[in-house]
Structure formats: C-alpha cells, structure tokens
Amino acid sequence: MIYTIAYPAWPLLSSATPGLLGYSTRAEVAADIARVDEAYGPLNAKLEAIELAALADDPELHAYAKSAGAAVFANNCSQCHGSGAAGVQASGYPNLLDNDWLWGGTMDDIAMTVRHGIRNEEDPDARWSEVPAFGEFMEASDINAVANFVLSLSGQDFLDPSVVERGAVVFDEQFSACHGSNGEGDRYQGAPALADAILLYGGDYETIKDTVKYARFGVMPNWSTRLTEAEVRSVAAYVQQLGGGEAGVPQ
C-alpha cells in the first residue's frame, strides 16, 4: 500500500497514478541520455566540424565515429540492409559490403546519400535517377533481346544466343547513354553497372526482363530529419569501413 501511494502504480485510462514522490522511469532514462550526450558532446562537435576525408588522420575520432556509427546502423539501417549490411538483393536493398557504389563510396558520398536519401519526395536534394518502363513503348522481342544481351555482358548463361546481337543494338540505342556502351554504368547519375553480375533486384533472365519492361523505383528516406549531423557522419564512417569502401580511400 505504501508503494502504490508513493510510486506510479494504478493504471488509468491514459496514464497511471503518479505517486506522491513524482518518480518517473521516463525521466530517469532522459537524464541518462542527457548525461551521455554531455559526455560525448565534444567528440560529436569535432566530428561535425571535420572534413570527412581527413577523419582517418584522427585515430581517436575515427574510432569513435565507427563505434557510434555501428549503433546508428543497427537502430536505423539494418532493417533494410541487414544486420551485417549484406543487403537483400531480391528485394532491392543494396549490399554495402562490396565495392559496387551508386553515387560514390567515399565517406562524403555516403554521408550525402544518408543525409538526403534516394528518390524520396521529402528532400529536394535527394539522389535521383529513374529508368523508364520500356514495356510501354518497346516491342517484346526487343525486350527479350536486350535481356539476353545484359546477361551476356557479365558472362552469365543466357537463353537465346541468336538474339544477343540484336540486343546489343537495342542496348546501344536505348541504354548506353546511362549504363555505358559496355555496361560499365555511370554511378554519378545513378545508373548501375550491368557487366559485373551485381544486379540489385536479381540477375536471372525473368528478373532482368521485368526490370526492363516495368522499371524499378526503390526509395530511401532522408535521414537528416531523424539523425543528427554527427550521427549521419558516424554511420557513413562505419559503412565505408565495412569492406566495401572505395578502393584507395583510407579506412
């Protein structure tokens, strides 16, 4: 009885009896968070101010960024990219462990992507690319031919060798401006490489045909509305060092 009078105890319609002592677990957690924020405040301020390209030159700050970024990733990114960041290819969630980067894989590039997202309508600075649904104006025979040609680019088995030559012509006419004449892609306009067998929605014939016919439109939110600048930078540092960071960039 003394406890129920002194502490929150009895449930009401929208809350509980507060108790005479005014104790609150929420307030206790908020105080703990405030203490942590105060303790790491100087490091976060330093992280927000540094040029990310120079982060590796400060071992203490770099170690802190990677550690903090791991927590940010687990709480906010792993639901789509997986706890190990290997992605879910068939669902269009990119693998972050390889070196196949759209829009660049330096820490600055990654931070930009995290900050503004991809193809979302909430942020005018979101990364943006869009492939048309070629099925709306392309003959089915040409779609079949170009799907076979795309499979041939990465040395995969394809269904019909007789149409690959025709597929090369269609590819050159319709796709090379974005994906390159040899399927090398153009990351800075968000056009993926097609010659490395790393295909976001799957690399079998039917999937490639559907991609050509119907198009894809994956969306990533702009995390700047939910993360602090220090958190954006820390998760960029964490992702960049997982093993898929740009070749030649200090990790």
Image: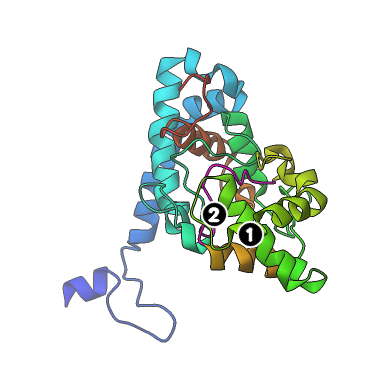
- For label 1, the SS is helix
Residue beneath label 2, please? 200
Q: Is residue 201 magenta?
A: yes
Q: Residue at x 73, y 56 (%)?
A: 166
The C terminus is located in which quarter?
top left
Q: Residue at x 79, y 68 (%)?
A: 138
Q: Residues within 10 Å of mark 2 (few under 14, many from 20)?
A: some
Range of residues picked out in magenta:
191-204
- For label 2, the SS is loop
Residue 244 x, y percent position in the rendering: 46, 34
- Whole-angstrom CA distance, mark 1 to mark 2, is 27 Å
Please tell me in which quadrant of the rendered image residue 183 appears: top right
Q: Residues within 10 Å of mark 1 (few under 14, many from 20)?
A: few
Is residue 39 at least partly visible in the picture? no
Residue 19 x, y percent position in the rendering: 31, 71
Q: How many marks?
A: 2
Residue lying farthest front? 162
Residue nearest the observer in this picture, 35 or 149: 149
Please tell me in which quadrant of the rendered image residue 15 appears: bottom left
Residue lying farthest bottom? 13
Please tell me in which quadrant of the rendered image residue 196 appears: top right
Residue beneath label 1, please? 162
Q: Main secondary structure of the magenta part?
A: loop
Q: Residue at x 41, y 36 (%)?
A: 68
